[in-house]
Amino acid sequence: MSVRVLIKEYPHRAIALTTSTHALVLRHSATSTDQNGSNNASSTSLGIGAPAARCMVEFSNLDDVDVSDYRALSSVYAHGTLGLITVNGDIFLVVVNGASKVATVRPGETVQRIHSVGFYCLNSSGYDSLLNDEVNPYPTDTLDEEGFEMGFGKGKGESPLEHPCLALKKLLSSGTFYYSSDFDLTRRLQDRSTDGATVSIDSLDAGFLWNSYMIQPLVDFRSRLSQREKRSLDDSGILTSAIRGFALTITVPSSSSPIRASRSGLPSSMTLISRLSCRRAGTRFNARGIDDDGNVANFVETETIYWAPSGVCFSYVQVRGSVPVFWEQQTGLLPGQQKITITRSPEATQPAFDKHFENLELSYGAIHVVNLLSNEKQSEVELSQRYRYHIRNSPLNHSDEKSREHELIHLTEYDFHAETRGPGGYEAASAIIQWVRDSADGFAYYLSEDTEEPTRSDGKDYIIRRPTTILMQEGVFRTNCLDCLDRTNLVQTIVSRMAMELFLNHKSVSASADFWVRHSSMWADNGDALSRIYAGTGALKSSFTRHGKMSLAGALADARKSATRMYINNFADKGRQNTIDMLLGRLMGQTPVHLYDPINDYVVAELNKKAGEFTQNEVIHMLVGTFNLNGKTNGINEDLSPWLCPNVDPSQQCPEIVAVGFQEIVELSPQQIMSTDPARRQKWEASVRRCLNENAARHGKEEYVLLRGGQLVGASLSVFVRANCLKLIKNVEGSVKKTGMSGMAGNKGAVAIRMEFANTSIVFVTAHLAAGFANYEERNRDYKTISHGLRFQRNRGIEDHDTVIWLGDFNYRIGLSNEKVQKLCQVGDLETLYENDQLNLQMVAGLTFPYYSEARITFMPTYKYDLGTDVYDTSEKARIPAWCDRVLRKGDNIRQINYDAASLKFSDHRPVYATFQCLISKVDERKKQQMADELYRQRKGVVGDTRAAGGFEDTDDEDLIGYESVEPGLPPASSDRRKWWLDNGLPARSRAQPPTDDHIPNPNKPSNPFTPSPEPDWVEVKRMTGKPEPPPARGTARAHTVDFNNGISLPSSMASSTTSLNQMQAKPTARKLIVPMYNGNGGPSSLDGTRDGAPLSRTVSSASTRSLPGLPVHSGPPPQQAPSNLAKEVSRKPAPPVPNKKPSLLGNSISPTSTPSPPPQRYRDDPDPSNARPQPPPPRRSMAAPPATKRAAPVSLIDDNEDRPPLPPRTNTDMSTRSGGGGRGRNTRANLLDDEPSEELEALKGWEVLRPVR
């Protein structure tokens, strides 16, 4: 889709990328703040400590943007944006201005080569005239062939003002960058979904994405959009992903094609794609060896693809990369001066080496290393020795098995120069085939074919033609020389031809000479392109690669290239390296770009908070079954109901989803492995569906339909759903992953099917893992390979789902002898068996299936039986019984109900089933959209035109976008246009209302309402009515202390906490008595509100004589506690303090709740006070107690509640069970709980008790 680049200057500079339906608007925000306070902020922050350049961004329908104020920057359409980059403090939008199609992998999957980019400044118009003319694509005095600045003979007519992005423009316009709007170009064909060509910018492989630094702010912005807007942004093609390397498709006419289309005469195509890694990118002498993250220099993944009109698609992948040790090489004008230095010891290198090969093994499987370094040059010999040492010590080659077939890394050392020095020349290099052919046979290749599958929808039968994976490549050749250019490319050409010949032999066809000429020419172009990127010139030996022989002209061309390389490497590479680092965001102090959307970010955050208002939950039932058929077909017509319709609770009958996994559905012969025949699976699917529908008819339920089936060699997975559930199911996809290293004899792997049931994602994975009693480590590795490598559309992995269920023959055994296992099975001691189960032990150790759960096993081991009997294996092999067939689950919305085996005896395994309850969520999209629209309107009213496409002039309001009130009801942040304290000329006020009439503002809350605090906003104060009771007799009330500093009463138990003991010793605080509330009935009452009818008695007291300086501060919100007597105590009016201070000094000591409030101030817009109850005003910092006008009656302080816990002991007092409180003879200090009057109590005589305020 074509993109127009529009710009406007007034009232602020903005750039819009528009399609026919949508617009992406960006503008610079010239504000002083580094962040906007929003947790949704996105940035690429590689420059630590450098402030981010802030930009507003908005993606909306084209109708919502007034484009009349914009003008077009160019008459030609653009091809999307590569992202944003900051250069010298200015922000530039990078746009692809020119591109041409160079490759078509399969119909509808095209690759474009970028040949022109534009840099448009967001914050200045000063650069608009500097890049009007495109970079001269032809060689000049100042540019080399690739558009790089050579630094000599600069032209006289050069502009005195150079654009700051000129070097970046030359690099990106050099013809080495490619992109695709149709599919994920960063991944090989095998790792892409076969369900459709959709590109999601956030799912690309960052290792090959060269504009990842520039596009990251836009990727983060996209992640905050709604699903509908994400799809619109992806479909618009505005965001572009670029790889660096090579891509080319050569059309093979029908006459030369090895696989001809019947009756159509359509040509086939051969494509070569090379992806250069950006993780350790650089030029020849500036990037060598490995880094600490396991990334190597000049790492390239090269994929050969052949597509025929019949639907056959072949793919073969190789990789190249620098020797993975820490080494450097000096530049020099003479070959002898280019000295190689190994910079780290073997022990310090091994961890990085292991990371590199572990990543390769996860991505590609087994690795065959082809080392082409010389055995004669001393520097190369040292590298080869270190390489050999690290492979020998790699954990991937450490196995209990001594057989080499369990080694994941094989090494072939082939001295290319020595082998090709004779009269045969470079043709002798083909002799390497004998050293690598075995691995090539084992690694196989990727193969898919279009198959027709019947399906049923809406009561009608359809035939769907979709690609079906037949074979997967499960290993890779890793080739290297010193530079990984000339020798490496020639050998990779030979390996590519060998793999394609292997594929054609399996198809019983052969290719013509013209076909191989096209193949060689394509590889020669690939070598030249990669060599120019890394070394500055085309590849040496490309004449032989292209024509199959070396001519004099080819030799002279190689000499010229060598001399040119020497010059470029010594004089131009430093600048090229600096430009590459700038593109990848790796320069020191390089500032990132920070994007925010004032409206959309707020709407998304609010919708997440209110998800419960438009989401409903519903419980569905699922049945999962797994069965290893041992290649047998005689059970197709048997009754499968004991397995698929077991006798379970009626609620579990006829579940909404049934997933059935088979292993060894076909006999695993080499012929079967080479072609997956779906006929056998389809027969079993018909049998399963017949059984399910018979059971559904008995229970009066809807019939089942086959949702989707998938197969990889002997493993298959079929998912059936009830017909009435189809309307809730969407985005159904399938994927497969091959495992193992044995290639042609390999029969292990996994098939997965995922779906979205309403708004809950569910994935089923059936797996057949490595066999063998002792191969549990290989089984762990198989799980890791499947979990990491199996990918769906948009790069979804297995772990990216709400509910995950694994089922299959996992082949984990029981680690006991056969005799012991047989005896334990006879006595039914399943606990002992399970304690020695390999899967159980490996999961407990965290070595496989992390975070998965398995229900308790209550059935006998399911493997291995004599056919047709319940007797375990009596053959010569005498297999130990084991629970090979398992079901595992993961997800917080799933609950397993049943787990059992069924007695079907036509295989040597027993089928296993499990039933589940799954909580699925249903989102009311209409209600959600209504809420989003309402929130959008509200937010737009607050933000106004302060957005990317707005029309107001810049103000400091932009600084405040993203700063919200601490609590709803509090005023918004102020700006030059909004000042919440100036309300029509009236004094400042807050319109926040208390939750109830019994709540007042918390006096401990900071006075600044915007300061975060763990304190609650409101405290409850019970309103007291009636007359106070007379005080009780002296010495009979429980003491209660009050902190003078904070004015909040504390119970004695809290006052004696260990948290405050040290503080009390450092700074003792005063205390005062609390008078209980008046109950309004004229008589004394106890603290719990009961009438004081019981005789008075002194309770056991252990109250502390000191009070807490303050409550310990908690980091989280205060816990919600039930109302207790503490709340009542807080609301009591305090008695006057001890009169050892002047009354005038006590103003700050009296609780703010102890005095009547002054009449509230009237506001012009306030309602009539006669019609509304006045709200309590905020407390003041200090209030002096008003003089009491009436003496309070005595009130009982006795707590009659016997259920209250005892208080902690007082210091220097004894616990007393008598009413007299003994044991105070040793206490020299006076105590409020002593029977005898103390000096402090005597001083209270003559003071009045305050009457509560009504």
Image (tube, rainbow, N blue to C red):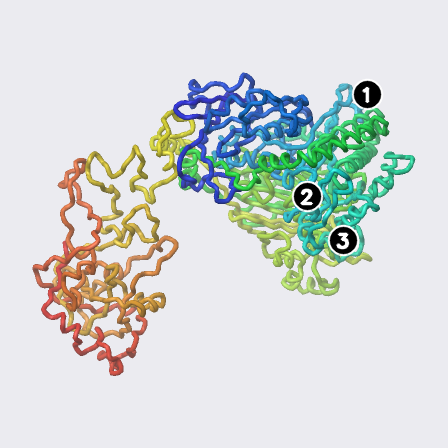
Residue at mark 2 to residue at mark 3: CA–CA distance = 18 Å
Q: Which mark is residue 1208?
A: none
Picture quarter containing residue 368? top right
Left or right: where 1056 falls relative to 989: right
Percent x, y of residue 645: 61, 45
Q: Nearer the viewer, residue 183 or 490?
A: 490
Q: Secondary structure at mark 2?
A: loop
Q: Residue extending furthest left?
A: 1189
Q: Secondary structure at mark 1?
A: loop
Q: Earlier in the sequence, mark 1 or mark 3?
A: 1
Quadrant placement of the C terminus:
bottom left
Q: Nearer the viewer, residue 695 or 402?
A: 402
Percent x, y of residue 404: 80, 52
Q: Nearer the viewer, residue 1125 or 415?
A: 415
Viewer can see residue 698: no
Q: Nearer the viewer, residue 284 or 901?
A: 284
Q: Residue extending furthest top?
A: 75
| Residue under pointer 3 | 389
| Residue under pointer 2 | 296
Percent x, y of residue 179: 62, 29
Residue at mark 1 to residue at mark 3: CA–CA distance = 50 Å
Number of numbered discs on residues:
3
Residue at mark 1 to residue at mark 2: CA–CA distance = 42 Å
Crowdedness of circle 3 by 10 Å Cα count: few (<14), some, many (20+)? few
Which of discs 1 and 3 lies nearer the camera? The answer is 3
Q: Which mark is residue 255?
A: 1
Left or right: where 1064 falls relative to 617: left
Picture quarter containing residue 420? top right
Q: Residue extending furthest right?
A: 423
Circle 1: residue type: Ser
